Image (cartoon, rainbow, N blue to C red):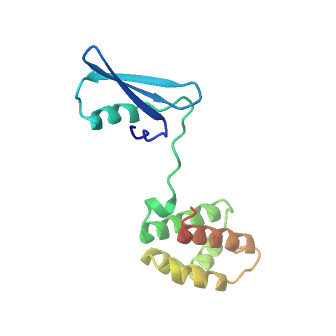
C-alpha cells in the first residue's frame, strides 16, 4: 500500500504498457492521474501529486507562533498597537503621553521578552480614553495566543 499524498488522498499505482500510472483519490469523486516510466523514483511521483491540490483546497494559515520569533512578534505587537492608536487621531500631546506611559512595555516587546510582557501588561494604567480595558484585553489575548501556540 502506498502512502497518502500531502492532501490525504489515497494513492494507488498500476503498471501499464511500461508506465507506472498513479491515481490520487480524495474519496469525494475527485481523482488525478500521473504517469511515469516504470521504475521512476516515487519521490518524483509524490512531488507531482503534491503539486496538484484538490478542488477548493485552501492552504492552512500559518500561525504567528510558527512564523515569528519573539523579537519579531514583539515588533508585531508594537505595530498593531500603533495602528490601533493611529485610528484614534490623537493630538501630539496625547501621543507623547501614550509613548511615555508605554515605553517600558515597548522595550520588553522590542527585546522579545514576551513572557515578561505578558506578566506585566495588566499593570498598564487604564484611563478609558488613551488606554482602554478593551485594548488591554485585546493585546493580552494576542500575547497569550502567541505564547500558547494558538495564534
Q: Position of residue 19 (x, y in %)?
A: 28, 19
Whether residue 10 is visible here, answered yes or no, is yes
Q: Position of residue 35 (x, y in %)?
A: 32, 21
- Quadrant for the N terminus in the image: top left
Whether residue 91 is visible here, answered yes or no, is no
Q: Quadrant of residue 120?
A: bottom right
Which residue ends up furthest to the top in the rendered image? 17
Which residue ends up furthest to the right in the rendered image? 128
Would residue 4 appear left or right of 84 to someone viewing this image?
left
Q: Position of residue 84 (x, y in %)?
A: 64, 62
Q: Quadrant of residue 80?
A: bottom right
Residue drawn at x 24%, y 34% is 41
Residue drawn at x 43%, y 30% is 52
Q: Quadrant of residue 6?
A: top left
- Taking depth in this image into account, of 74 and 70 the one nearest to the observer is 70
Which residue ends up furthest to the front in the rendered image? 1
Q: Position of residue 111 (x, y in %)?
A: 43, 78
- Taking depth in this image into account, of 22 and 109 the one nearest to the observer is 22
- Taking depth in this image into account, of 138 and 85 the one nearest to the observer is 138
- Quadrant for the C terminus in the image: bottom right
Residue drawn at x 47%, y 32% is 53
Q: Is residue 75 above or below residue 111?
A: above
Amino acid at each position: 500500500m502506498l502512502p497518502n499524498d500531502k492532501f490525504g488522498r489515497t494513492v494507488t499505482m498500476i503498471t501499464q504498457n511500461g508506465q507506472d500510472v498513479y491515481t490520487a483519490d480524495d474519496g469525494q469523486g475527485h481523482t488525478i492521474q500521473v504517469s511515469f516510466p516504470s521504475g521512476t523514483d516515487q519521490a518524483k511521483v509524490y512531488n507531482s501529486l503534491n503539486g496538484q491540490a484538490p478542488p477548493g483546497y485552501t492552504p492552512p494559515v500559518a500561525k504567528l507562533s510558527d512564523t515569528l520569533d519573539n523579537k519579531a512578534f514583539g515588533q508585531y505587537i508594537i505595530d498593531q498597537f500603533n495602528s490601533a492608536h493611529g485610528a484614534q487621531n490623537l493630538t501630539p500631546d496625547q501621543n507623547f503621553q501614550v509613548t511615555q506611559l508605554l515605553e517600558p512595555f515597548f522595550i520588553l516587546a522590542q527585546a522579545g521578552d514576551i513572557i515578561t510582557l505578558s506578566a506585566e501588561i495588566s499593570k498598564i494604567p487604564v484611563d478609558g480614553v488613551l488606554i482602554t480595558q478593551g485594548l488591554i484585553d485585546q493585546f493580552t489575548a494576542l500575547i497569550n495566543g502567541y505564547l500558547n501556540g494558538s495564534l
